Amino acid sequence: MNISFPSLESHHFPVMLNEVIKSCSPYKKGLVVDCTFGGGGYSKELLMRSELQVIALDRDESVKNIAQDLKKKYQNKFIFFREKFSNLDKILSEDNKADVIIFDLGLSTMQLEDYKRGFSFKSKEKIDMQMGLSATSAEEIINKFDEQTLKSIIKNLGEEKEAGKIARNIIKFRQDKNITTVPDLVAIIERSKKKDYNKKINICTKTFQALRIFVNKEISELIEGLIKASKFVKQGGKIIVISFHSIEDKIVKYYFTNYSSNKSRPSRYLPIEEEKNNILFEDYFNDFFEPSVEEISKNPASRSAKLRFVIRKKNAFIYPENFKIKFRKYLDLENA
């Protein structure tokens, strides 16, 4: 049975909801962990449709009222924690593992449309970009970091070709006054880039993405979250990830592919005996789902989404050392 899409008034669009629910099958009972609760779209649907228990996590304090409403309705079937998914080990344990763990990466519609938080380049407010439980804001970064570090953040986390020019103009602008509002930053980016009317994305998108990723340590979170999900999902259980930009998807694809049965040697330098210890998942062949034309028409923000899932192999967990080494460039940058 297909699920109807939420109305625009709901301000929440659980991306590829049908595909997520189908990917959760055949589990009718058991434990699902929704690592990015947001507006609760996946959690609500799972609770309505099955005897599953749902544990939901979110670092954003603004979702607590939605979580409280679900708790009232479903009682012991639903538990919410305000927590980062990199801390899954605080929620799950060897004696309490999940049947399914879901990650819906990136911004929620609610976060983007709350202009006070500064995620959207349409905002007139301060440049904040904190999802919650963050140590710094985008405003602090663009006013305190040196030109080379700003260039590196914008280039590597936003994949922005004009990163050098944007960083240089940020430094020039802040010599006169601090850059505090979204319009200040937008003006700098527009001054640094030529407007391309043929492109579908706004010229500010990549710089805003880079700053948001850095503020919230999203790459570090993703890598740590995937490792801990592999440890605390049951053997035969599923890990489902929806990504929205190429860096996220590259990381998920690499992890699922290189630690699966059919690609059991993450590094050609590992001895044959060691390669067997790196198998975490059943065979994975780079399969993924994308939103339907209908969904994209109703929710254009879903257009770049990719859903991938793997099945945990029935063996002991071995820490995937090479995973972090592979993406050290991003980890070192986020923790600079």
Image: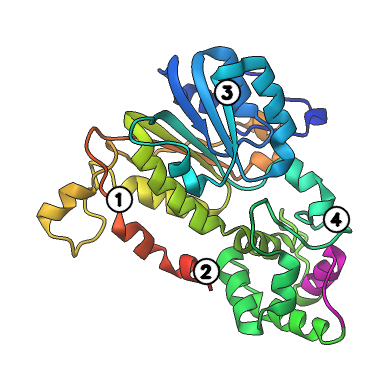
Local packing at callout 3 (Cα closer than 10 Å; few below 14, some 14-19, many 20+) is many
Q: Are marks 3 and 2 in contact (CB under 8 Å)?
A: no
Name the kind of residue labelled 1 in the image. Asn
- Front-most of residues 16 and 173: 173
Q: Is residue 327 above or below residue 152?
A: above
Q: Is residue 122 above or below residue 332?
A: above
Label 2 – label 1 distance at C-alpha: 25 Å
Q: Which of marks 3 and 1 is nearer the N terminus?
A: 3
Residue that mark 3 sits on: 78
Is residue 225 located in the magenta-colored stretch of the structure? no
Q: Which of marks 2 and 1 is nearer the N terminus?
A: 1
**In the drawing, does residue 14 fall left or right of residue 248?**
right
Label 3 – label 4 distance at C-alpha: 35 Å
Local packing at callout 2 (Cα closer than 10 Å; few below 14, some 14-19, many 20+) is few
Q: Which mark is residue 240?
A: none
**In the drawing, does residue 234 fall left or right of residue 150?**
left
Name the kind of residue labelled 3 in the image. Phe
Residue that mark 2 sits on: 335
Is residue 185 located in the magenta-colored stretch of the structure? yes
The residue most toward the left is 273
- Kind of element beneath mark 4: loop
Name the kind of residue labelled 2 in the image. Asn
> Which of label 3 and label 1 is nearer to you?
3
Label 3 – label 2 distance at C-alpha: 34 Å
Residue that mark 1 sits on: 258
Residue that mark 4 sits on: 123
For image coordinates 54% across by 67% down, the residue present is 334
* The magenta segment: 177-190
- Front-most of residues 148 and 33: 33
Local packing at callout 1 (Cα closer than 10 Å; few below 14, some 14-19, many 20+) is many
**In the drawing, does residue 19 fall left or right of residue 214?**
left
Q: Position of residue 70 (x, y in %)?
A: 67, 22
